[in-house]
């Protein structure tokens, strides 16, 4: 299950920074601008089928630029833009990995369509330009440029649906906020950096 929470944060990071023409600003541009200039906290529910088993849950996703923190289901994932920490409180284990910069997130997706939703919001259809684990995405953004729902079709054709229940826009935080504190001495820590 920990890979689901890590993937959830990466999905938000991957789908939001879309390069669009500057002379044609829209709700997607406004949404990306918010994520780029603030710390955004989303309370979400998600559903996905993992290895043929439906998985549903609640989580909190905190995103700031290339940093994120995801909590839910007994797991916590931190990324400060350089390292990723995956913490499993039930098994008292932590795995630390380097962030790979093989993919330029800004160039990862292209906007392939959009349509108006009721209440003046927009639905955007995005397609991956290169293999990244996500084949396509559909984002529903309300008239105030707030993400309400995201549906990601993964390369294996499974679909992850995320419903955003609340969004809090906060001032930028120090990068230390996206790293766990000192690990308890009885935890097993595997550092792969």
Image: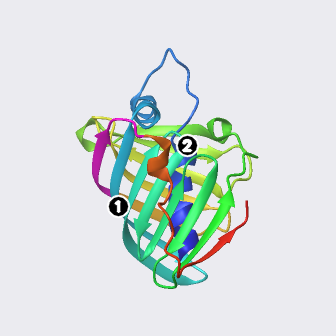
Q: Residue at x 58, y 84 (%)?
A: 52
Q: Which residues are magenta?
A: 164-173
Instruction: Decide which of 118, 151 is in the foreground and name it.
Output: 151
Q: Residue at x 49, y 60 (%)?
A: 180
Q: Which residue is mark 1?
A: 44
Q: Which residue is mark 2?
A: 66
Image coords of residue 63 (percent x, y)? 45, 47
How crowded pointer 2 is (Cα within 10 Å; few <14, some 14-19, many 20+) is rated as some
Image coords of residue 152 (percent x, y)? 53, 58
Query: Colour mode?
Result: rainbow
Image coords of residue 93 (percent x, y)? 56, 78
Label 1: element kind: strand
Q: Is residue 138 visible?
A: no
174 to the left or right of 101:
left
- What residue occupies the far front of the structure in this picture? 185
149 to the left or right of 178:
left
Quadrant of residue 57 in the image? bottom left
Image coords of residue 17 (percent x, y)? 54, 37
């Amino acid at each position: 299950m920990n890979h689901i929470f890590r993937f959830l944060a990466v999905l938000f990071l991957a789908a939001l920074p879309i390069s669009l023409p500057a002379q044609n600003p829209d709700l997607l541009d406004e949404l990306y601008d918010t994520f780029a200039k603030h710390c955004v906290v989303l309370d979400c529910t998600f559903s996905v089928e993992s290895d043929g088993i439906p998985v549903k849950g609640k989580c909190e996703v905190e995103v700031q630029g290339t940093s994120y923190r995801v909590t839910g289901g007994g797991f916590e994932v931190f990324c400060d833009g350089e390292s990723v920490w995956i913490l499993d409180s039930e098994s008292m284990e932590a795995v630390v990995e380097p962030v790979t910069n093989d993919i330029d997130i800004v160039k990862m997706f292209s906007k392939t369509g959009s349509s108006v939703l009721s209440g003046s919001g927009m639905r955007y259809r995005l397609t991956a330009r290169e293999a990244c684990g996500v084949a396509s995405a559909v984002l529903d953004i309300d008239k105030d440029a707030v993400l309400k729902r995201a549906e990601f079709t993964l390369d294996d054709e499974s679909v992850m649906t995320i419903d955003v229940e609340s969004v809090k826009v906060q001032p930028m935080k120090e990068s230390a906020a996206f790293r766990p504190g000192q690990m308890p001495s009885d935890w097993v820590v595997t550092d792969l950096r």
